[in-house]
Image (cartoon, rainbow, N blue to C red):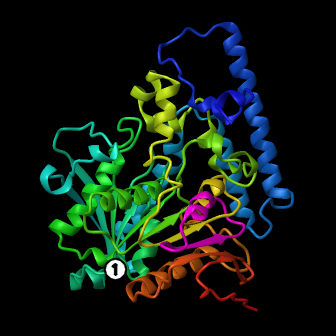
Amino acid sequence: MTATDYRPGDVAAIFGVRSSAPTNASLPDLVSALFATLAWFQSFFVSLCAALFEPLPLPTSTRRAAVTIAIARSLGAVTPSHWPIRIVTEIPLAVMGSVLKRVPALDGVVYRPIKIKVDRERHEPDLSALGIPDYNDKSRVVGAEWVATREWFAAGLRTDVVLFLHGGAFCLYSPRSYRPVTRQLAKLGFTVLAANYRKSPKHPFPSGLHDAIAAYLWLVRDEGVDPARILLLGDSAGGALALGLFQAISALDLPRPAAVALWSPCLNMDLRLSDTVIANADKDFLSIITNERLGIVRLYAGEHVVRAGKAAMDEFLAHPYVNQTTAQPTCPVLIQSSPAEQLAACISKFYENQNPATARVQHDLLVDTPHDPFFLGVLIPLTANRDLVQLGFQRLWTWWRDVQEGAVPFGKVQRTWHADGRVEVVNDTTGNAVQVVEE
């Protein structure tokens, strides 16, 4: 199916070339904008009332989660810029992160911001052979932040290191706004390096990937961290960067990390190929990605691609570091996502494409959670009866211990995790997975 097969208002419109030239609004334009605003308020209040009073679209989710998802979905659907989202979400999260940094006595977790000076010889390999251009020939600094418990900092240990690449549609957030998440990772026992990669629209693809590679090589070559003790972890857009980072260093025959963990990764930005973007719209909050006025895909592609027209956009969407559903990572991979999220189709396609003879992929589906449950779930409980997000964090640590002990089998395993304690095996090619039922 091509973009021309879609009706007006469908997701294909977000890829169209939009003029950046200013125009004078006519009276019909103003009237149209007014009616659009009224329609949004109507949709917002209907969604909010449904979340507050009607049966939940995700049966075992909490009411607070339903209300939060409804508000986020309504905001993302109409915002013409990423700035309102920054104001509503990123500023409060950054304030919370600042409080966590200044009161380490709360849980013994310490945050130490650093600056990585990128050396082009040591940290910036030539990616042109991979079809990845470099738009920045100048020296630069990549911001980052160490996060660990006070005891780990005192011991100066560099084991169980997570290179964390945060989400945010490639244009939002920072390590500071993600401190509630990295705090949880540190409490598990990880030493976290959270990289503040460059973001669109100022720095489109592949700027973030270049920064992720630079941060990884700095860890290995400057800090002396053993690659066999490094876990690449990313959520949503950061999951795409984490997988792209592993692909790049593997293709260049550089030292590879021990494993990759992906939380609700955005592995395909061509939303025309993902039926769950529309089918799961009432259960999730990713209306930001189908907002035609905002154009997240256009922002990530860059103005040079948008101005070049449809052929250039199609080429961008097919780039193997943008559409990564056919990637074949050779290390252990843990995917943790929701079966009800709007990115479910592209995540499932990645899992299905893995070769069971060479892959070591495990996919945990956290039932009745939205997209990126680990980001939202550290702020509010997402599921009743049992907190699947906290269970997911413990599962990540257990899997990492298996990675370190060489106990992750070849093959593919997919499980569903329920709020009532049930763990069901959906698919298993290893012969080692066991169905777990908890009373």
Say whether residue 149 is magenta.
no
Vertical relation: 288 (above or below) 115: above
Residue at image position (41%, 62%) is 97
| Along the viewing direction, whichever of 322 and 57 lies nearer the viewer | 322
Q: Quarter of the image for the C terminus: give it.
A: bottom right
Identity of the residue drawn at 61% across and 78% down: 429
Q: Which residues are magenta?
A: 348-370
Specify whether 313 is left or right of 132: right
The answer to whether one can see residue 76 in this image is: no
Mark 1 element type = loop
Estimate the x, y position of residue 408 in percent, counting from the top left: 48, 83
Extreme-right residue of the structure: 54
Q: Quadrant of residue 340?
A: bottom right
Please name whichever residue, 76 or 67, is drawn nearer the observer in this view of the structure. Answer: 76
Residue position for label 1: 160
Count of marks placed on residues? 1
Q: Quick check: 361 above or below 407? A: above
Asked whether 353 falls inside the magenta stretch, the response is: yes
Whole-percent x, y for residue 132 in the image? 33, 43
Q: Is residue 206 above or below residue 428?
A: above
- Can residue 143 be seen here? yes
Specify the quadrant that holds the N terminus. Answer: top right
Q: Is residue 83 left or right of residue 27?
A: left
Q: Nearer the viewer, residue 262 or 45?
A: 262
Image point 50% across, 78% down: which residue?
Answer: 396
Amino acid bearing label 1? Asp
Residue at the limit of the structure toward the front, as seen here: 357
Determine which quarter of the picture holds residue 435.
bottom right
Residue 107 against residue 28 in the figure, above or below: below
- Neighbour class for label 1 at 10 Å: few (<14), some, many (≥20)? many
Left or right: 88 in relation to 158: right
Q: Position of residue 333 (x, y in %)?
A: 48, 71
